[in-house]
Image (tube, rainbow, N blue to C red):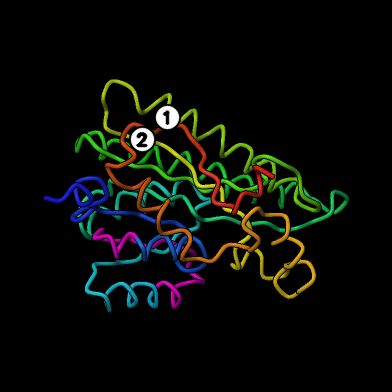
């Protein structure tokens, strides 16, 4: 076997991806399928048609895929979904927590409900779903948990206090998950990807403002905003044996934004 296949091969692995119907979640799910993993896409019931399309995209390239609908803010529903996810291709060894919401409210307009919704989806769900799946990873002696952080894990943006709080929490949660689950040669690692600006549902309002988008691109070192294909390398790396000695880290995929 070639060294590149030993390091980056995930043939036969099973990946569960929340937020798998669109945006960053769907892009990561597809690239993991391209790398040989079977995929279980997860999103809200209202996203069922998009989930079917995501599964069809994987099947078109000869991959294996299925989908489940779930409101990830509901901890009880998460547990049921995690149990059911093993019925397709076996217990997932790779988890990508990509479900997210940013309601972009001014501080005056934030309600208790909107605060809870953003914390529950962006932060709370990542922990409880990982905890539901960790036993299966331990049985197999190998597992990869990939959380989705944000530029807002490091700095503040306007009209995003709950979102920023949740994404700051994701960075620390990733460290805490690593401390809890990567010890004693478990074979389990927990890392996060911190994307810069990518065109997704969460940023659609910004992408309608050309001057804003150009300004954001100028704040990177590379000089452009992210494209979904940019996710492939880091996602496969963190999901594969190549990253077996990396845990508790947040890798910024931001064109150098956080370095500038």
Q: Which mark is residue 189?
A: 2
Image point 68% across, 45% down: which residue?
152
Q: Is residue 191 left or right of residue 237?
A: right
> Where does the magenta region start and end?
32-51
Q: Is residue 66 left or right of residue 46?
A: left
Image point 28% across, 67% down: which residue?
65
Q: Secondary structure at mark 2?
A: strand
Residue 133: horizontal and vertical position, in percent?
33, 42
Do the numbered discs 2 and 1 sit on residues whose CB atoms are within 8 Å? Answer: yes
Q: Residues within 10 Å of mark 2 (few under 14, many from 20)?
A: many
Q: Is residue 221 left or right of residue 82?
A: right
Q: Which mark is residue 178?
A: 1
Quadrant in the picture for residue 53: bottom left
Q: Secondary structure at mark 1?
A: helix
Vertical placement of residue 210 versus 135, above or below: below
Q: Is residue 199 left or right of residue 217?
A: left
Residue 79: horizontal and vertical position, in percent?
39, 46
The total of numbered circles placed on residues is 2
Residue farthest along the front direction in this orientation = 222
Residue farthest along the right direction in this orientation = 108
Marks 2 and 1, the one that precedes in the sequence: 1
């Amino acid at each position: 076997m070639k060294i590149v296949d030993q390091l980056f091969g995930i043939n036969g692995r099973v990946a569960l991806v929340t937020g798998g119907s669109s945006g960053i979640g769907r892009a990561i799910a597809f690239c993991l399928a391209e790398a040989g993993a079977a995929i279980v896409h997860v999103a809200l019931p209202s996203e069922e048609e998009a989930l079917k399309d995501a599964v069809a995209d994987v099947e078109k390239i000869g991959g294996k895929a299925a989908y489940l609908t779930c409101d990830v803010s509901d901890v009880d529903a998460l547990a049921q979904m995690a149990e059911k996810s093993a019925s397709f291709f076996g217990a997932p060894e790779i988890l990508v927590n990509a479900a997210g919401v940013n309601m972009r409210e001014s501080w005056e307009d934030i309600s208790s409900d909107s605060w809870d919704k953003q914390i529950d989806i962006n932060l709370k769900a990542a922990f409880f779903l990982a905890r539901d799946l960790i036993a299966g990873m331990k049985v197999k002696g190998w597992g990869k948990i990939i959380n989705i952080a944000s530029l807002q894990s490091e700095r503040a943006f306007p009209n995003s206090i709950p979102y920023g709080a949740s994404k700051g929490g994701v960075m620390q949660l990733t460290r805490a998950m690593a401390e809890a689950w990567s010890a004693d040669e478990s074979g389990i690692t927990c890392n996060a990807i911190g994307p810069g600006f990518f065109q997704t549902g969460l940023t659609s309002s910004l992408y309608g403002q050309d001057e804003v988008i150009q300004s954001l691109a100028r704040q990177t070192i590379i000089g452009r905003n992210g494209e979904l294909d940019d996710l492939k390398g880091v996602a496969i790396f963190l999901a594969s044996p190549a990253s077996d000695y990396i845990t508790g880290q947040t890798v910024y995929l931001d064109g150098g934004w956080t370095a500038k």
